[in-house]
């Protein structure tokens, strides 16, 4: 019995060392046309930020030129970037969103 237990434990420990997916930062960039209110709306609806946190991030974008809005696996980051571009385009805003490998 003890030999089976040791093999099971050894097998379990190797599973805990699984490779994690690469993570990507999703970044919003400042422009002279997109309203601050729309950026806050994007941050709350697309990125799930609270109104307070969204306002803080929006001010960072406005003052610094860009800001990270979240860190996600590649496919989720790509979807967030695409969603931002689609929503902005539908409202006539040139809001730019990019992703960078973490």
Image (tube, helix red, strand yellow):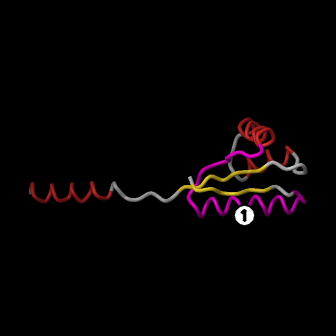
Task: Give the quarter of the figure containing the N terminus.
Answer: bottom left
Q: Quadrant of residue 65?
A: top right
Q: x, y percentage for residue 13? A: 27, 54
Eyeballing the image, is 28 above or below 74? above
Residue drawn at x 27%, y 56% is 12
SS assignment for the magenta stretch, majority: helix
Q: x, y percentage for residue 40? A: 79, 44
Residue 65 horizontal side relative to residue 15, left or right: right
Farthest front residue in view = 64
Q: x, y percentage for residue 52? A: 74, 35
Residue drawn at x 85%, y 44% is 37
* Magenta segment: 65-93
Residue 70 in the magenta stretch? The answer is yes
Q: Quadrant of residue 24?
A: bottom right
Residue where numbered disc 1 is placed: 82
Residue 27 horizontal side relative to residue 85, left or right: left
């Amino acid at each position: 019995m003890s030999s089976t237990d040791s093999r099971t434990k050894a097998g379990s420990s190797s599973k805990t060392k699984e490779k994690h997916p690469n993570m990507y930062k999703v970044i919003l960039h400042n422009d002279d046309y997109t309203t601050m209110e729309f950026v806050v709306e994007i941050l709350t609806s697309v990125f799930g930020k609270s109104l307070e946190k969204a306002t803080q991030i929006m001010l960072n974008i406005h003052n610094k030129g860009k800001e990270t809005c979240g860190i996600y696996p590649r496919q989720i980051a790509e979807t967030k970037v695409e969603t931002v571009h689609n929503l902005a385009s539908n409202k006539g805003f040139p809001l730019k969103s990019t992703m960078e490998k973490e």
